[in-house]
Image (tube, rainbow, N blue to C red):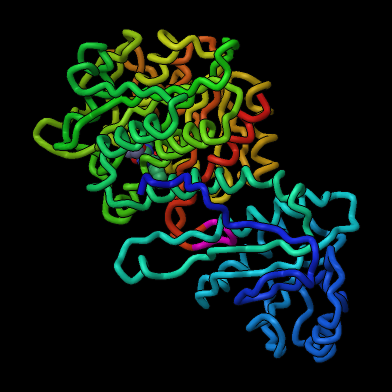
Amino acid sequence: MTSRFKDNMLFSSIADFTKRKEADLLVFPFWEGDKKAVAAAPLGSFAAILKEPLEAKDFVGKEGDTLLIYPTKEEKRCMLLGLGKEEEVTIDRLRHSFAAMTRFCLKKTIEKVNIVTPIVKEKEVTQEGVLIGIVEGVLLSNYRWKITESTKKQSLLQSVTLVGVATSLLRSVERFETIAQGIYLTRDLINGNADDVTPRFLANVAEEASKKFPSIKVDIFDKKRIIKEKLGLLAAVGRGSSQETLMIVASYQGNARSKDHTVLVGKGITFDTGGLNLKPTGSMETMRDDMSGAATVLATLQTAAALGLKCNITAIVPTAENGIDALSFKPGDVYHAYNGKTVEIGNTDAEGRLILADALAYAVKNLKPTRIIDIATLTGSIVIALGEGIAGLMSNSDDLADKLMASGIITAEPLWRMPLFHPYRELLQSDIADIKNVGGRPAGSILAALFLHEFVDKIPWAHLDIAGTAFLNKEKGYWPKNGVGFGVRLLINFLSNL
Ligand code: BES
Ligand code: ZN
Ligand code: ZN
């Protein structure tokens, strides 16, 4: 599972249409309503072959439409692929069209594809943008969660040649192949059984990353160290499980001369039963995804190292299982956070903010962060507010928030900023401690963020609540069913712009 980051590439390119190699499929893209394929290179005799299905109106070229034809020539089959209306083209529409092509290939066990690369006359999307759309659309959907023996044998695309593209232009999008490996790793970690992807497993992922990339250094805090360091909230949350409770501190130094330092904190609850405030049936079944934030930051760190980004990053993953046991931490009790604040447990199911609070406070005190970004499947409330397509963003810094939003627009991982509305802080007031970890159902996501805010001091900080976007019960465009890998491209884009 962790042996991602291969060297072999899925994509190659060839400028001349007549020099393309054999493949299982040749893809011709069409704008909706157009009578001719949009090709970056002349198509020779193929132009005539493509006419008939269009004249018969079997294919109109709507976004993601596919039609197969079987000319008796070089490739076994040809596909007409709809891109939608040319005047409405965006990179994301291209992602969707080429994801549809990829899903078709996966269904039909097609492994080798030649794509006639389209050209876009509209100024909105550059030729590089076209390649980004194709490459990301294909890579994001060329994934299977290989769990059973039969799914392990199912094919994936093995080779995709962009016809009509100079090699130099392909170079500019090669980095997405590396980023895709990070996304696949994130998905694998989310999808794996909670009994397999344990806190120790996540620690091993980090250790392996440091072996593969010498620029990554890893420190694993075990239970003894967690107690000694007084990470009291993390220790409390992990008490009710036979799995170890750990804190992973993994850093990548890509710019030794700079003091700029981004700390990424990822929620690593490998299973969330809710604890003694047990979740009901129907709410627990997907809770192996409660380490999605952890998977995202560990994969982002490795991807940054693989890309050699010129920035300094530390990923902190507080990780535990929120189990239920005689030793479980208890509602109504008070525990000490790393920064000395006392926390009354109003609900053991609001455990994510507890382990994050310790990790945030640890970062503030020890890591001299320029900025902190945490990412977490934190609240059911954000799913109600924003659904499964948009993640919540809360921040004490307009600048940081704006930059993250901008990255999310580019990578089509949309964020929506929610207010860090300080008057609601009083809802978290406790009679017996400095703060309580819950404050009622209204504005649940904002309350969670206000709780975290107590542990970041004045450091520019942003919180991404991915409870809705990390995991899907149904495939949606290029986002797969189950673990999505939401946030990896966004964070890589953000870090690349630093
Ligand atoms: N892990 C859950 C949040 C969650 C919900 C993630 C749905 C993914 C999908 C979190 O630990 C939790 O249980 N939050 C509670 C907080 C409440 C007790 C204040 C919630 O949102 O109900
Ligand atoms: Zn919970
Ligand atoms: Zn949780």
- Classify residue 10 as left or right of residue 336: right
Residue 66 vs 442, above or below: the answer is: below
Determine the residue located farthest toward the left in the rendered image. 326
Residue placed most toward the observer, 51 or 192: 51
Residue 443 seen in this snapshot:
no
Place of residue 282 in the rendered image (x, y in percent of width and height, measured from the top left): 32, 56
Place of residue 413 in the rendered image (x, y in percent of width and height, measured from the top left): 61, 44
Residue 461 seen in this snapshot:
yes
Q: Residue at x 64, y 76 (%)?
A: 25
Place of residue 259 in the rendered image (x, y in percent of width and height, measured from the top left): 57, 10
Q: Quadrant of the C terminus?
A: top right
Q: Main secondary structure of the magenta part?
A: loop
Residue 17 vs 1, above or below: the answer is: below
- Classify residue 5 as left or right of residue 245: right
Residue 264 vs 197, above or below: the answer is: above
Q: Which residues are magenta?
A: 475-479
Quadrant of residue 362 in the image?
Answer: top left
Q: Residue at x 61, y 39 (%)?
A: 415
Place of residue 326 in the rendered image (x, y in percent of width and height, measured from the top left): 9, 34
